[in-house]
Amino acid sequence: MKIHIPNSAFLGNLNAFIKRADFSDSSTLYITANEKWMSVHPVVLCMIAALGVMVRSESQEKQPILCERFTATSKHYFKRMGLFDFLRLDSEIEIVEHESAGRFIPISQIQDSKTLSRFIEDMIPLLHLDVKQSQSIKYIMSELVRNVLEHSNSQYGAFVAAQYHKKTNTIRIGIVDTGVGIKRTITRSHPAKTDADAIRLALTPGITGTTSKEGGTDYNAGAGLFFTKSISKTNKDFFVIYSGDTLFKLLKKQVEGSPLHSDPFDDRHTIESNLPVWGGTVVGVDMTLDDNEDFANLLENIREAYTAAVRARRRKQYKKPNFI
Amino acid sequence: MKTIKLHPLVGTFGENKDVARDVRVEQIVPILEVGKDLTLDFEGVDSVTQSFCHALISELIRNYGVDVLDRISFANCTEEVKAVIGIVVDYMQ
């Protein structure tokens, strides 16, 4: 596998970073980097860490991870976010440890439910968020990581990281796994020929890989990704999901006054297939902290959209008696 | 009328579905089974996820029918908690 860390890789230009990567040979991971400057979204760090942990654990090679010496002036960021700890490499980068509060959450690996609950509790003070700002972030983190723990079948769990960006007053979040991917999960209960079909279904309210029954099981309703996408859409933020060979990107600019759609393809988005195949799921979210819709109002809007979608599907499946 | 206080079990943010399912199976169902009504007291719980709420009550509506909502009261809910309960109750009917 090969990864090149470019000078810039954020949700808006993530496609270019992915296109340059090669995830095919999992016996080695070779990391190169821009020599002068690297500025990346936490989701990129999570992807590299997730691959590193997988390769380190599964490869028979003596030196399964090779990483070029970082020379860019921004190299300290990668050290501070804990990337080299996950790769188990000596970065030869010296940093003066500052108090991390208010700035970032370094890459964390979450493998069980209790760890997730503790992580969410610790996360908000680290990002210095007030109650109102923290609601959407806690919600998204919980739903997305639980998706990984319940559906990905990954022995390595979820890799998460977050970064507060002062200039744009935005929290950038990455949640990544190297599990079975959305298509294998969703096709347990619903037909999907391509990764794009599977992503579309996964973002549709009431569709879960655990059952084809309306209303889900006692444990799953198929709502987590729809809620997350809806929060992003309402707040006019980027939301990216990449699984298999396909990357779906909800664009920041939506049609003014556009309602929440049950079909993600009705939202302003881009979708690109035939990318290097990621054998799991990658989710990136940007959350602008100012001018956000009140969370209770947002939930009310989601309720209307969700219920309408589920009822419409039920009406479609409703069979009338055949009187002759 | 029995009362189940959720804050000691879930803290300020109800998101752990395993805990929600345990509360349903080990506490709510036994009360309903003996014909008693109950109150779910959310005092101190600021918000909950849809997944948490689904694991807590969806199976009750499926198994006992929607009339089970006449036997369960939701106390001290914030606007956010009310909204999420409303979502689950809506799509289960």
Image: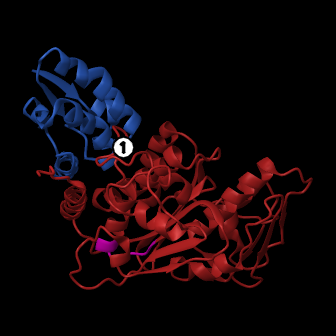
Chain colours: A red, B blue
Q: Is residue A118 visible?
A: yes
According to the picture, the residue beneath numbered tag 1 turns out to be B15
Residue found 31% across the figure and 27% down from its top: B23
Q: Is residue A206 above or below residue A219?
A: below
Q: Which residue is depicted at the point 50% across and 70% down? A: A196
Q: Nearer the viewer, residue A199 or A188?
A: A188
Q: Please, what secondary structure does the residue beneath circle 1 have?
A: loop
Horizontal side of A241 relative to B37 (left or right) equals right
* A139 on left or right of A20: left
List the single residue furthest toward the left: B70
Judged from this view, the residue extending furthest toward the top is: B34
State the count of labels: 1
- For image coordinates 15% across by 34% down, the residue present is B65
Above or below B78: residue B60: above
Q: Dot 1 falls on which chain?
A: B
Give the side of residue A42 with respect to residue B80, left or right: right
Residue found farthest to the right: A62
Q: Quadrant of residue A134?
A: bottom left
The three-letter code of the residue at mark 1 reads Glu
Q: Residue at x 22, y 50 (%)?
A: B84
Question: Closest to the observer: A293 or B64?
Answer: B64
Query: The N terminus of chain A appears in which quarter of the rendering?
Result: bottom right
Task: State the image coordinates of residue A25 (x, y, percent, origin top left).
Answer: 80, 63
Where's residue A222, x and y in %?
A: 37, 52
Does residue B4 show up magenta in the picture?
Answer: no
In the image, is residue B50 above or below residue A36? above
Magenta stretch: give its range. A233-239
Res. B12 visible in picture: no
Q: Position of residue B77 (x, y in %)?
A: 16, 43
Residue B83 screen position, x and y as percent: 18, 52
Could you say which quadrant of the image residue A98 lies in? bottom right
